[in-house]
Image: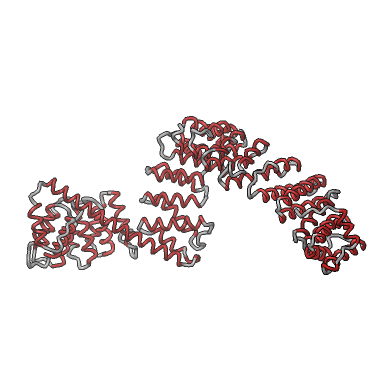
Amino acid sequence: MLIQGPNLPLNARRTGARELLRLGWPETVNCLVGVLASDNKPARLAVALALADVPDPDDAYIEPLISMLADPDADLRHAAAAALAGYRDSGVSARLREMMLDVSQPAVLRLAAVEALGAINKRSAVAALVEAVALPDSAIAQPALEALERSTAMDFGGDAGRALAWWEQSQSEPLPDWQQGQIDRLVRRSRELEQDLRELELRLVESYRAEYIRTPEAERGPLLQNYLKDRSALVRLLGLELVQRQLGEGKPLPADAATSVRELTRELLGDADPAVRVASVQTVARFRDAADAERFLSALAVERRANVCQALVNGLGYVGGGEACETLLKIVRSQDNPARAEAVAALGRQAERGVLGAAERDAIADELLKLFAETPPAQAALRERVLWAMAQIADPGFATAFSQALCEREAPLVRQAAARGIAAVKAQIEALIPVTRDADLTVRRTAVEALADCACTDEHLAALWERLAPSSEPDAAVRRISWRAAVKLLSGRSVAEVEGWLGRLPDTEERDAQVDELLAVLEASLAKVPEGLRELGRVWTRVGAQRAAQNKTDLAIAAYLAAVRNLRMSQAPELTEAAQALLRLSLLNERYDESLASALAKGSPALDGGALWEAVRPELAARLNAGNAQQVIQMLSSLRQHPPAAFSEEITNEMSALLAQAQAPPASAPASAPATQAAQSQPQDAAP
């Protein structure tokens, strides 16, 4: 019914014929002979094409196929010729020769016989074609020459004379030698055709890819379905690649085709092409559907291709759970199984996903520990995979194995995996310290990352601190990781401890920024502890003084501002000293402005205006006496315009007097009594 039913596509009919031929039931031959003799063209075509795929079919099909050579329909003639070419003997070549050379036969039949002989690679068929080529005025001479070229994989350039000369020379060769030459030529031609086909398929794939990209996302569903159903393995691979990309980008499959695409992808798990099966497994694994675990296990039980088995085992790590544990452990125990490393990784991934029970985790832990002990260091890839899986299990019993795997005789990737393992189990952390000095950058960076993840003691902090200096650690990324971990560890420490560690900071370009960051972090943790803020304010004051001495004015001002903020919040008496230093430094270096004045003036307790004036008055007098009247004018103008605190009337008058003295012409500007007295009573030290 599948072959002869109405309105069925050719592929469906051909499938029906192939199934009957495969099953080989006694009634198959009579059934198919009857189809070939019928007037059902699609059915006859399907049966003939199916017979063309069968080596040496039953002799009962010869007569109906030969009859089809005279059919007016070209498709039927071509299919019949292809099917007849599959016969090894049975007199087919002789029958075709007679038909080809019989001038009484219709031209269509003779040409069909030529086509069939051209598909037969036996010497008898070649000899028959040579006879036709030798007929100078025959209508079949040229088609026979072309068929001869196809049959022998030779290129005579359309010259019958060359063909006859070749035959004259080769027909007397011993049959084994002739057959070997024929095989060599056909293999070479087959490779050329295969390469041409491959290039065409690749161009087709790129065309389909471009079509997919141009198509709006909402309309891509039908394209994906067509690609996944295409006869070309490369196109099916394209379909799977596009599905993977869609899922990898976190995008849902097209709504109108999501279910169909998933089912078509799963059907390709049984595809004839191993590459398609591998891609199908990888794509199905991305669905993250636990129901697919049973499909993978069933496929694994019958699969013989190593790369497909590895893909299936890998996929079980993403979709499998306890039901796959025993199968994976069995593969792990098998030393000669190519999928062993993938099975180890799959078990680790299942642990990472949290789908294993306690008993299963214990069984896996025992097996992994045993496997690691049995695997020699030379098998670095397997040892690394085992350590990675152990890190996902995170059994405290693994700590010793992780620690031992940090030794220098291990490959760098093994030492990296061991470092991550220690971070996972949070045990034997001290073993990481020497590895933070490892000569291999990748190992060193991983060890620092692991130590950063679980550091808790001063010994750990010291190892991280050592990595901050470029002289000790040339890699900037490692220095950043170390600093981040150090800040995290110190954020819960006392101010005194933090200040002690700050004193050990290496003198680098990052030092000032590191100080600011660490003290800011500490400030956030001490926000509700007034005594702690007071201590921190003192530290900020000392930092400000150090930076001022180094002529880092802006950084010093920032430090003094932080000191004022913390000392004010803690109601500390040292507030006045910090505020004086800030005001003096900012005025002398032309950094005093409205925002800085606001930071000093606002808040409680309010600053003492008299104390602030006492800090800057000597500086004003000294500069006035030194002839720096313009600087005095600028400083006083700023103070009067943006006062940092409330000034008394006496101070205001004194400011006015100093300003008038600074603004007076030099020849008639004797110093006022208060200014003169102030200048005489204060040391004339220069600005820092």
Q: How many marks?
A: 0
Choose between 476 and 196: the one closer to the eye: 476
Position in image of residue 125 (x %, y %): 13, 55
User: Which residue is most to the front?
Assistant: 667
Residue 206's image quarter? bottom left
The answer to whether residue 31 is seen in the rendering is: no
Indicate left or right for 303 with 164 as reference: right
Residue 458's image quarter? top right
Position in image of residue 674 (x %, y %): 90, 60
The residue located at (80%, 48%) in the rendering is 528
Choose between 354 and 172: the one closer to the eye: 172
Indicate left or right for 570 with 421 as reference: right
Indicate left or right for 395 with 264 as reference: right
Choose between 161 and 298: the one closer to the eye: 161
Position in image of residue 235 (x %, y %): 38, 58
Choose between 485 and 243: the one closer to the eye: 485
The answer to whether residue 360 is seen in the rendering is: yes
Position in image of residue 312 (x %, y %): 44, 45
- Quadrant containing the N terminus is bottom left
The residue located at (42%, 45%) in the rendering is 299
Relative to 474, is 206 above or below? Answer: below
Residue 626's image quarter? bottom right
Relative to 234, is 293 above or below? Answer: above
Indicate left or right for 89 with 403 as reference: left
Q: How is the image coloured?
A: secondary structure
